[in-house]
Image (tube, rainbow, N blue to C red):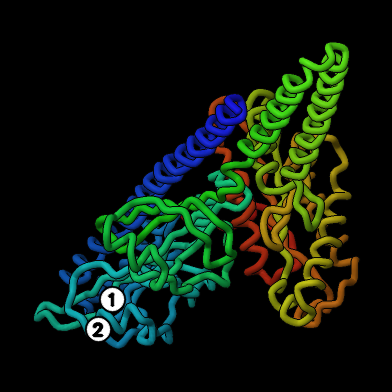
């Protein structure tokens, strides 16, 4: 009884310790992410304040306002989180924007932020719900300020939009377990983005959740354990509100993930305690029987250890693979990218990457269904897997319909040739796609290569970032084509 009670107390204490440590870790992560969000919003808010002051000083009708386009373009280029900057007049018509393109018919008078500034004489910034950008077609978070004429009347709105992918990419770099999540919400309960990302959850209203009804009114930060309204998973939930802006960051760790090691350890220790109790109970009856039982127990323990090690190896392999396509997953890619990047820096050899995205994939899912979409991704994954011609080559499902091929010791020309082979091979599959002008499923590809030099070593995120930019150029150029990062026009 003493051994059983002691084991039970130790196991229960270890469980509480794991949960407390996870609660502290999620709270610290929420604080760090809230500071990151605060810095991003503060930097853009300061930029907007300078723009509104300059426009107010010049006057909305001044031709000098139109000449601010290069300045806005340079500012948006220098801030990676920005999708764009825009100034519109009191009727909502676009006056000047950071893209440098003329949009004489552009009008944002129907946007919620414009209506709010028009009807409220406030000079404070407004952070709104996620919108689909009319100029870039990306999901963006709008931050806006009112512009007044010299007499105080409404003159227009200065708008800055944050690319939602800026937050989702950053949040994806944090390990919150297989069932964990990171959320960015407005104080009114509107969900801006969530990791893992699901565009169906964008702008979902959580104002009636315990976070906004009970926790936030009581304290700007805290933790609680509850079941998720999204998927029903029980999580340790930590939140941190930003003081200056109406934004809340949440970090939720699944109890199953947190207690996974505890469950295994408790099972092993419980087996050991049970065996020990059986040994003690039978020791007084027969010494020989006791020895035999102990030998059997040792054999079982060794077998259990071997099985556990085999299971761990299997789980480790599964953790590096995407369940749908069988390709390497994002986590494994991040590890291999860092390893190959360091190796390229040491040896000075090239490192290339081909990033592909299925053209009109959303329409494909809408027409043929998600099961057909999954089968389409599996077929594309097989083509990409076939391109792993060397041990170091790595085919990856990067996320959604995006896949990539990491090519160490491959120069720009070789990577471009490989990308064209992939594009042609996928088109040759002949998967019918009525919404695609080509009539079949096609992909667009972006290629980037880096060659670390002795004087300059490019940052690791330049490889993926410029490949992604090249992919977007391929999309804009008509899809079903390959673009290289070095071929992109200089936008600086």
The local crowd at label 1, few if under 14, some if 14 to 19, many if 20 or more residues have their Cα within 10 Å, is many
Depicted 334 relative to depicted 155: above or below: above
Question: Is residue 336 left or right of 434 when viewed as pictured?
Answer: left
- Secondary structure of residue under mark 2: helix
The residue indicated by pointer 1 is 157
- Secondary structure of residue under mark 1: strand
Asked whether the beta carbons under mark 1 and mark 2 sit within 8 Å of each other, the answer is: yes
Quarter of the image for residue 187 reads bottom left
Q: Quadrant of the N terminus?
A: top right
Residue at image position (36%, 57%) is 75
Frontmost residue, 368 versus 273: 273
Depicted 454 relative to depicted 72: above or below: above
The residue indicated by pointer 2 is 118
Q: Which mark is residue 430?
A: none
Frontmost residue, 133 versus 475: 133
Quarter of the image for residue 4 reads top right
The answer to whether residue 98 is visible is no
User: Residue 469: horizontal and vertical position, in percent?
Assistant: 59, 57
Q: Earlier in the sequence, mark 1 or mark 2?
A: 2
Frontmost residue, 15 versus 446: 15
Please name which of the two marks, 1 or 2, marks the residue nearer to the observer: 2
The alpha-carbon separation of the residues under discs 1 and 2 comes to 8 Å
Residue at image position (78%, 30%) is 309
The local crowd at label 2, few if under 14, some if 14 to 19, many if 20 or more residues have their Cα within 10 Å, is many
User: Residue 383: horizontal and vertical position, in percent?
Assistant: 86, 56
Question: Is residue 276 left or right of 14 when viewed as pictured?
Answer: right
């Amino acid at each position: 009884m003493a051994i059983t009670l002691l084991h039970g107390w130790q196991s229960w204490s270890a469980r509480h310790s794991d949960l407390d440590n996870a609660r502290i870790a999620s709270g610290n992560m929420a604080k760090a992410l809230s500071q990151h969000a605060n810095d991003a919003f503060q930097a853009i808010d300061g930029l907007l304040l300078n723009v509104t002051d300059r426009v107010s000083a010049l006057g909305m009708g001044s031709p000098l306002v139109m000449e601010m386009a290069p300045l806005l373009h340079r500012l948006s280029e220098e801030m990676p989180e920005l999708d764009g900057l825009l100034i519109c007049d009191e009727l909502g018509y676009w006056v000047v924007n950071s893209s440098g393109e003329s949009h004489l018919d552009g009008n944002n008078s129907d946007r919620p932020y414009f209506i709010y500034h028009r009807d409220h004489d406030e000079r404070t910034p407004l952070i709104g719900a996620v919108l689909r950008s009319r100029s870039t077609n990306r999901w963006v978070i709008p931050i806006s300020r009112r512009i007044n004429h010299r007499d105080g009347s409404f003159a227009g709105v200065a708008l800055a939009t944050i690319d939602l992918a800026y937050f989702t990419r950053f949040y994806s770099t944090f390990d919150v377990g297989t069932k964990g999540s990171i959320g960015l919400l407005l104080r009114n309960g509107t969900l801006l983005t969530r990791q893992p990302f699901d565009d169906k959850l964008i702008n979902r209203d959580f104002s009636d959740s315990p976070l906004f009804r009970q926790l936030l009114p009581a304290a700007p930060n805290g933790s609680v354990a509850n079941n998720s309204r999204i998927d029903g998973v029980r999580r340790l939930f930590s939140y941190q509100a930003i003081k200056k802006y109406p934004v809340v960051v949440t970090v939720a760790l699944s109890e199953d993930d947190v207690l996974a090691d505890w469950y295994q350890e408790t099972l092993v220790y419980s087996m050991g305690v049970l065996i020990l109790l059986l040994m003690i109970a039978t020791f007084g009856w027969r010494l020989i029987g006791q020895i035999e039982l102990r030998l059997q127990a040792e054999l079982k323990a060794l077998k259990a250890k071997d099985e556990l090690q085999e299971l761990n190896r299997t789980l480790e392999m599964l953790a590096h693979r995407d369940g749908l396509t069988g390709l390497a997953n994002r986590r494994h890619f991040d590890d291999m990218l860092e390893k190959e990047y360091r190796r390229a820096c040491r040896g000075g050899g090239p490192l290339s990457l081909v990033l592909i995205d299925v053209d009109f994939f959303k329409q494909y899912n809408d027409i043929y269904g998600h099961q057909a979409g999954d089968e389409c991704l599996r077929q594309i994954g097989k083509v990409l897997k076939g391109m792993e011609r060397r041990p170091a080559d790595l085919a990856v499902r990067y996320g959604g319909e995006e896949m990539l091929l990491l090519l160490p010791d491959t120069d720009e020309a070789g990577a471009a040739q490989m990308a064209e082979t992939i594009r042609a091979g996928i088109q040759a599959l002949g998967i019918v796609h009525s919404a695609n002008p080509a009539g079949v499923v096609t992909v667009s590809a972006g290629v980037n290569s880096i060659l670390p030099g002795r004087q300059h070593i490019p940052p690791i995120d330049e490889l993926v970032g410029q490949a992604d930019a090249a992919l977007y150029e391929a999309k804009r150029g008509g899809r079903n084509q390959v673009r290289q990062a070095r071929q992109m026009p200089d936008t600086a």
